[in-house]
Amino acid sequence: MIEVSHKSLQFQQGLLNRLRFKIRNVSNVPITFRIRCNNNTNYKLDHYMGLIHSLQDFENCIQNIEAADIKLFGDQLEIQYAELTDPLLDLKEFWKSRKSLDHVIITIEVLDVQQQQKDAILIELQVKQQTLQKELQSIKQQYNQVQKSAVDINYFNQFQEGFTVGQLMIIIVIALFLGGILR
């Protein structure tokens, strides 16, 4: 029978905020509502109850009173609503004698913007750190390959410098001769 413009109301920590939200009657009959807050110490509503005609909107405001840094986890508004058959009936009297089972819950959040910015920077730095670690690992692997190639070249150079070409040819001939004898 009603729709609410926000599923959650978000205040910034440490700041006085005033947020607007709308309650829309989507039915063809007049609707009355009342709003209850589980933390009336920190929040103030412009209207705690009202009447919304068929297919009309009702705009309301909520303010965090003291910009308190301490908010209870789970702060919320409960909007109870019911069909109003007698438009001349006093709304306070109507709600005294009735408890509506139909309701909508809107959560209230207090956001620490500075902490959110710090968290975003931390996540970004962690991603960069992982990227740099992968690049460092790749560079280490390349370095090890180059070192292995350099060691292989060094062994060949030492072997080549230790013998003259003539000495190498004599060793090859002896090796072929011994290979032929041993067969």
Image (spheres, helix red, strand yellow):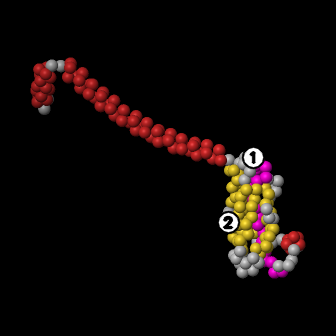
Residue found at x 23% / y 26%? 156
Lateral position of residue 128 relative to residue 35, left or right: left
Q: Which region of the structure is painted magenta?
A: 64-86
Q: Amino acid at mark 2?
A: Ser
Please say if 43 is above or below 105.
above
Question: Label 1, label 2: how many angstroms apart (C-alpha)?
Answer: 26 Å
Q: Are marks 1 and 2 in contact (CB under 8 Å)?
A: no
Is disc 1 placed on a helix, strand or loop? loop
Lateral position of residue 121 relative to residue 20, left or right: left
Residue found at x 18% / y 19%? 163
Query: Quick one: 128 or 43, which is closer to the camera?
Result: 43
Please say if 151 is above or below 24.
above
Q: Earlier in the sequence, mark 1 or mark 2?
A: 2
State the residue position of label 1: 69
List x then y, in percent, for residue 142: 36, 35
Query: Quick one: 89 or 104, which is closer to the camera?
Result: 89
Residue 161 among magenta residues? no
Regarding residue 67, the answer to whether it shows in the image is yes
List x then y, in percent, for residue 108: 72, 57
Is disc 2 placed on a helix, strand or loop? loop
Query: Quick one: 57 or 117, which is closer to the camera?
Result: 57
Q: How many marks?
A: 2
Predominant SS along the magenta part: loop
Residue found at x 81% / y 68%? 49
Residue 67 among magenta residues? yes
Residue found at x 80% / y 64%? 47
Q: Amino acid at mark 1?
A: Asp
- The label on residue 5 is 2
- Few, some or many residues within 10 Å of mark 2 (<14, 14–19, 20+): some
Quadrant where the image shows the N terminus: bottom right
- The image quarter in which residue 180 lies: top left
